[in-house]
Amino acid sequence: MNYAIPAGKKVRIAISGKSGCGNTTVCTLLSEKLGVPMINFTFRSLAAETGLSLAEIIERAKTDDGFDRAVDTRQIELAMRDSCVLGSRLAVWMLKAADLKVYLIADDEVRAARIFKREGGDIEQIKAFTRMRDGEDTGRYKRLYGIDNNDYGFCDMKIDTANHDPERIADLILTELCRRELIVPRG
């Protein structure tokens, strides 16, 4: 089914979740189905804009919070331009103007298995790295913004991605957007 955003309206969808939850896949599907941009401005994007290498950005970001703030600020600037799907770890907290806030959930085992499938490696090392990264992210978000990324109860939708494939998750979100009259079926 195809969908349209009613004339004169802008729709901004914010989607967050920890690594391996399917954020990028679901955001890509939604942006394609709605014909709106997917915004996922990252350190890689910042590197392209600044002329620094990705490795330089990552290294400098270890001691300079300005890089995280630059990425987060730029994402919001881009999202406020027009209808979009914003996918990032902090999208649901940072995009105050989001018309729909969706948090994707998956347990540690499911997330590690997805990362393993995507990137390969040793599953136990992936589990350990993912736990470490989650802890570092949580600490950084609290320090930078006072955000507890484990507190997503305010989101409009919370979807356990272990129970649905990405197409079904996109359909659940599209159904909710229709219910809220933010989009309409067409054709």
Image (spheres, helix red, strand yellow):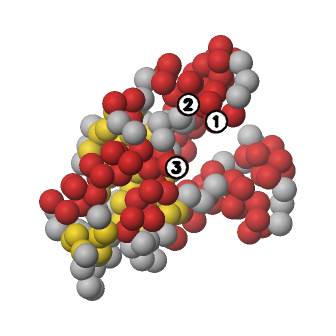
Q: Nearer the viewer, residue 148 or 90?
A: 90
> Which residue is under mark 3?
24
Whether the residues at callouts 1 and 2 have beta carbons within 8 Å, the answer is yes
**Residue 101's spot in the image, x, y percent?**
32, 52
**Residue 135's spot in the image, x, y percent?**
56, 26
Q: Nearer the viewer, residue 63 or 179?
A: 179
- Crowd tier of the residue under label 2, counting other residues whose Cα lies within 10 Å: few below 14, some 14–19, many 20 or above: some
Q: Amino acid at mark 2?
A: Arg
> Which residue is under mark 1?
118
* Residue depicted at x 73% and y 24%: 121
Q: CA distance from mark 3 to mark 1?
A: 12 Å
Q: Which residue, as the protein is rendered here, is positioned at the far top?
A: 124
Q: Amino acid at mark 3?
A: Thr
Which marked residue is nearer to the observer: mark 3 or mark 1? 1
* Residue depicted at x 52% and y 49%: 24
- Which quarter of the image is occupied by the N terminus? bottom left
Whether the residues at callouts 3 and 2 have beta carbons within 8 Å, the answer is no
> Which residue is under mark 2?
114
Q: Is residue 85 above or below residue 173?
A: below
